[in-house]
Amino acid sequence: MALSSILGFKSNDAFDRSLQCAKTDKEIDEFNPKLNIENISQFITLPPYADPAKYLKMVNEKVDRVRIQFLKGTTTLAFKFRNGVIVAVDSRATAGGFIASGEVKKVIEINPYLLGTMAGGAADCAFWERVLARHCRIYELRNKEKISVAAASKILANMIFEYRGMGLSMGTMIVGWDKRGPGLYMVSDDGERISDNLFSVGSGSIYAYSILDAGYKYEMSTADAIDLGRRAIVHAAHRDAASGNIVRIYHMKETGWEKIEEKDTNDYMYQYREDKTMNF
């Protein structure tokens, strides 16, 4: 096809067979003629390769095919304060230097008392946090009570841990409110799980941390906390080319999460420049 010739893609039998293959420990591309719409569910539990990391390395380094490079960018943050947890994110999705979308919803509403953030591979984060939502709902039906933030984050960490080294790209935060009060956990793509009062994840996190470290106080008011999260995202959007577009802010309270605002970061940049509260 014309597009494939422009991209320099050269197909081969092994690559074509990799689209439908069985998972074995000996071969990456073993054709499986029995794969169909009726039994596909048993094949999508794992990636369709015996060694996904090896396959991803192959499609990234071989020069006779389209190179796949997982270059990502985002800014997400969350922090506890006396009245709950503030979650703030941008909305830009990038593929290397290409801005793929400016309207990505990086806060996943798991249930009325749980939120998850998205950083890394959008598909990985969206899929696994939706799987987590299913497990949380099953827990509620079985135990007649809502799941704790610690338990929800542990379920996600355990699932991801089983896929470590297989090419997942995730840096997600789980935020919620349970019997013990507000909870905040960060879960990475190798199954690591950490609890703390403040996190920022993504390519723009170093810029967000500069604002958070300077202005964060646990005893701050709700208005000050929202403003701090907003300024951190706007600053990251200004300094990091892979972050920007819309800033979304959520407030996790005892009664559940509340969506505070959804506004273009450029509007705040002009506002902060005029009132000289930030150096742009």
Image (spheres, helix red, strand yellow):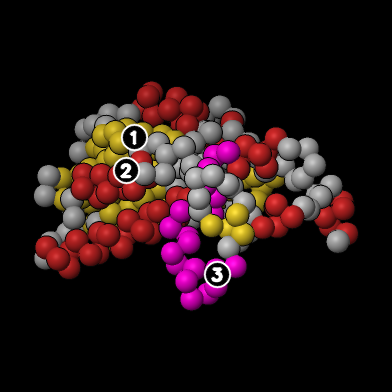
Q: Would residue 184 be found to the left or right of residue 190 on screen?
A: left
Q: Secondary structure at mark 2?
A: helix
| Numbered range of the magenta stretch | 33-54
**In the image shown, does 82 or 89 lie closer to the viewer?**
89
Task: Identify which amino acid the numbered label 1 is placed on.
Answer: Glu
Q: Secondary structure at mark 1?
A: loop
* Residue 214 seen in this snapshot: yes
Q: Main secondary structure of the magenta part?
A: loop
Of tags 2 and 3, the one toward the viewer is: 3
Eyeballing the image, is 40 above or below 174? below
User: Where residue 93 sits in the image (x, y, percent)?
Assistant: 58, 48
Residue to which mark 3 is pinned: 34
Please report the residue visible at 25 percent of the width from the left and 59 percent of the height from the top. 136
Task: Identify which amino acid the numbered label 3 is placed on.
Answer: Lys
**Residue furthest bottom in the image:** 38
Residue to which mark 2 is pinned: 157
Is label 1 in contact with label 2 (beta carbons under 8 Å)?
yes
Please report the residue visible at 77 percent of the width from the left and 52 percent of the height from the top. 12
**In the image shown, does 13 or 169 lie closer to the viewer?**
13
Q: Would residue 23 be found to the left or right of residue 212 on screen?
A: right
Residue to which mark 1 is pinned: 192
Please report the residue visible at 27 percent of the width from the left and 49 percent of the height from the top. 155
The local crowd at label 1, few if under 14, some if 14 to 19, many if 20 or more residues have their Cα within 10 Å, is some
**In the image shown, does 9 or 124 lie closer to the viewer?**
9
Is label 1 in contact with label 3 (beta carbons under 8 Å)?
no
Task: Identify which amino acid the numbered label 2 is placed on.
Answer: Ala
Q: Is residue 42 in the magenta section?
A: yes
The local crowd at label 3, few if under 14, some if 14 to 19, many if 20 or more residues have their Cα within 10 Å, is few
